[in-house]
Amino acid sequence: MDFEKPWDEFYKGIDVNINYPDSSLFGAVCEAMEKNPKATALVYMGRKITYSQLVEESLRFADLFRRLSVKPGEMVAVCLPNIPEAVYCLYGLSAIGAVSSFLHPLSAPMELDYYITELKARYVVTLDSLIKNFSASTLNSDVKFLIVSPEQSLSKCKKLLYRLSNKKISVPNRENIIHTKKLLSGCDTEEIVPVQTDKDSVAVVLFSGGTTGVPKGVMISNFSLNAMALQTARMSAVEVSGKSMLAAMPMFHGFGLAVCIHTTLISGGSCLLVPRFTPREYAKLIIRHKPNFIAGVPTLFEALLNCEELKKADLSCLLGVFSGGDTLPVDLKQRFDEFLKTHGAKVRIREGYGATECVTASCLTPVAKEKIGSIGIPFPDVLYKICKVGTTEQLPYGEQGEICISGPTLMMGYLSHEEETAKVLKTHEDGRIWLHTGDLGYIDREGFVYFRQRIKRIIVVSGYNVYPSQIERIFEAHESIKKCCVVAKRDAYKMHRVKLYAVPNDGFIGDDALRRQITEYAKGCIARYAIPKEIEFLESLPMTKYGKVDFLKLQNDANKETE
């Protein structure tokens, strides 16, 4: 008997019969190009880049990688903001059957070392201004750095302005640091014959904490990423072709890469690239370009409510507003819906849910109906069920347990972490493979899904995942810290911020001087958004009856201060 799907009736106006392509990511974007080669694919700092130019530039990057002997299946680290070169890397590597792995440009040197080691990457593509973020050990290794500049894809006028308003960046003169501009000028796109990639081969690796809080590379196939993009386009309930998406979510984030970039481009839409987000600049882009879709984390929408530039803006251009990456507070949704209404928009904010392990989005509030506190209904061809924690036993509607997902968008597994893969991808009695998300929730009788909390320890700061166990290990490696615990503290703007409770080692005094010392130490090991904003020193940490640090008590104590 087929799996019961009570949510089917809410696919109003959506064609749920999707034919998934067998092509690579590059093949999928080429199909979109063939339909309308002169349509705008990317908009970068006012310059419009057509679909034919997107494919041409992607092939130039493909030839660059080919000439550097990048092989099919090889993983290349891409540490770039949302600039055209990041998109060219995505599709250029796909064209030769290689794998792109997008890294957070603001990652600390120690984190970048870890990612590069996990990927066994021979090449890293990064900005000239970011080369200083890599550790001396990596810069002195056999890893080669392919340098791009934000000005490479600017119009002639904007290039001049860029050079006048920015200091010239000094890049070390080393054999393993390669400037791409000159190499690209000699690339021949006619030399590239796109590889006929197996649809089930790895296309992208994105890093996620999985169930343990230790970052692991999530291997996503061409088929899964293409499938999710087509599902997302259908769930938008609007024809995406010819429409524009304001792509502010970064490409190292599954939401940014899969929803804002790939979904838009294989559907014939245009991406308005936002290389550096500030609420003010974002608001200006909305006013200037009048995008049809915006997507972001709750922090973004809170910031827009307080943005002076949008006070008198006409938002009637918006056909879809999507929130993901963190729980959308009911109060914020109500306030933003009212904001949209009073500014001429005929849409309401639609909350979604997903995980990197299933590419990203897999559930969204339908147009036909919304429920307070719900994250919506599953995408077409995606199944949701609730299981008793630690088992494969399905629970009845209304009962809380672990959210499990099955469908065509599941990851292939964690890179080089087979045991962790086996913990989250499980074959159930129905013969299907199910992703155990590590999140608690329930499904009501109409099929609407509700997220409640995470089983695994994780903190979400402005939509970015922070893994407490990872940060604790870093701080406990410092000579001054005997024991520590990281918790989430509620924040009106970022939803959460990181707080550190620490027990100083003998001979060290827990004072402001030590706070400054360990904060400075953290800057070389932890991404900026994950550095604790508060540090409180204790003589000892509370323990549970099982002899473990009682992080829930500390978290409750931290949040009592905000009540």
Image (spheres, rainbow, N blue to C red):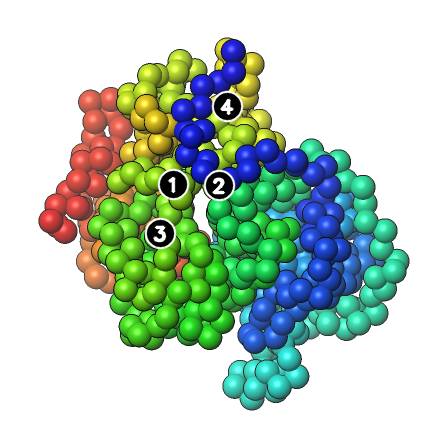
Q: In front: 474, or 513?
A: 474
Identify residue for label 4.
Answer: 434
Element carrying mark 3: strand
Q: Earlier in the sequence, mark 3 or mark 4?
A: 3
Under mark 1, the amino acid is: Ala
Under mark 2, the amino acid is: Gly
Q: Earlier in the sequence, mark 3 or mark 2?
A: 2
For the residues labelled 3 and 2, the Cα–Cα distance comes to 18 Å
Identify residue for label 3.
Answer: 349
Instruction: Tell me what residue is drawn at x 57 percent, y 86 percent.
Output: 161
Q: Nearer the viewer, mark 3 or mark 2?
A: 2
Q: Earlier in the sequence, mark 3 or mark 1?
A: 3
For the residues labelled 4 and 1, the Cα–Cα distance comes to 28 Å
Q: Earlier in the sequence, mark 2 or mark 4?
A: 2
Identify residue for label 1.
Answer: 368
Identify residue for label 2.
Answer: 13
Q: Earlier in the sequence, mark 4 or mark 1?
A: 1
Q: Nearer the viewer, mark 2 or mark 4?
A: 2
Are the residues tagged 3 and 1 within 8 Å (C-beta)? no
Instruction: Tell me what residue is drawn at x 55 percent, y 38 percent.
Output: 15
Are the residues tagged 1 and 2 within 8 Å (C-beta)? yes
State the image quarter where residue 319 is shown: bottom left
